[in-house]
Image (tube, rainbow, N blue to C red):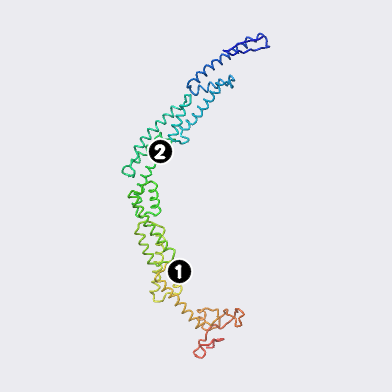
Amino acid sequence: GSLSCGCGASVLRATVRWPPSLLGRFEALLSRRLAARKRWIAAVEVALSGSPPLGEVTALLGRAETMQLHDDARAAELSRRAAGGEAWEARAAAMLAGKAACSLGALQAHLRAAGSLPLRLPQEAALRAKEAGARAWAREAEGALQGAARWQPSDAASEEKLRSLLRRPEPAGLTLPAAESLSRELERLGWVREAAALSEEPKPRLDALKEATSRADLLGLSHLPAAASLERRAAAASKWCGRANNALRRRSYLNQLQALSAEGAALGVATEQLEEIDERVASAARWSERARAALASGGSASVEEAVALATEAAALDVTVAEEGKVKELVQSHELWAKRATGAFVKRGCGASLLEALTHRGEPLETTAESEDGGGEQSGTTACCFCTGNDAATTSKFMIGCDA
């Protein structure tokens, strides 16, 4: 059998080879589909002529997919509008959630883009409310900021008020200039508080003073009296440190280091150089006290004590007044020992002066240089001068003493 049916100007002719009993069922099914298509077309035309909700456009596209209307121009237009709306919605959701910070201008531009889309967007109202709240918050924040060119702490809003404004939800997810200004205002008030505490410290560290003056420059606070005071202290301490470094690089006199120490202490600033100078001065003072005690004994200080003092003086990196006298004491000991050795120990003998004196001229088991230059030899060697009373023999070397 055959079947003809039409919708408007379109006429569909179908030739079937089914049994006549199925023809009625097929005709009913085809009629339902054509009626659904007509309803879809009517709904699409209404949607395309206005600004329907994005959800309605998405539903029409789903029905077009079911009816296999992929090539329909109206379906293509719906798809284009839905894609634009969904992209707008995705960015609006990110703005509302604050996942990616954006400026107020970018938010306003996104709202203007919504006006160009012939759609009613679900999140547009929420985004417009956020924009209105941000503008109102910005006006309130600007009212809490100083308008003077030279900032003064007395004219600033309280830290509590500034923090309260920053905790409000309106600026969340937005890079607002007023928010940055509020944060900078809080930094300035914090600097004023820290500078006051630093000024009250009896001996602040130089690096803390330098950091405070550097932050004052960055925050535009160099004109404040507190900043000028800290800068003067830092400059005076830095200048003193330069002189101290020169003194520490060389062997300076104790009185010079003591004068530098007194001058550095008077600055009221803690520095590494002052600590090192004080340490050197203290070490040198302790050494000087021991040296004066040794020298005051009338030369009765032991050789070991004098040598130890001289060795310590060389390691002090400080020139002390008693150092020369200690060196003279050590030299006098060394000269006496040399003269005594020459008087009691033969040249080339390996025995010490003490051994030669305590053996009273007896033969010593020691090492001496060979007379023929063949190196050292060991054995019983006469190392002592004769200790007899005969002037003719006491000045001569003896093979053995017969006194």
Picture residue at 41% right of the left edge, 31% below the top: 131
Q: Dot 1: within a 10 Å radius of its alpha carbon, few (fewer than 14), some, or many (20 or more) residues?
A: few
Q: Number of numbered discs present?
A: 2
Q: Which residue is mark 1?
A: 314
Q: What amino acid is at disc 2? A: Pro
Please, what secondary structure does the residue beneath circle 1 have?
helix
Please, what secondary structure does the residue beneath circle 2 have?
helix
Image spot of residue 247 (x, y percent): 41, 64
Q: Quadrant of residue 25?
A: top right
Q: CA distance from mark 2 to mark 1?
A: 65 Å
Name the one closer to the observer, 390 or 184. 184
Name the one closer to the observer, 388 or 321. 321
Name the one closer to the observer, 135 or 352. 135
Q: Is residue 300 above or below residue 181?
A: below
Q: Is residue 287 above or below residue 195?
A: below
Sequence-first tag of 2 and 1: 2
Q: Quadrant of the N terminus?
A: top right
Q: What amino acid is at disc 1? A: Ala
Q: Which residue is mark 2?
A: 177
In-image side of 32 versus 222 (left or right): right
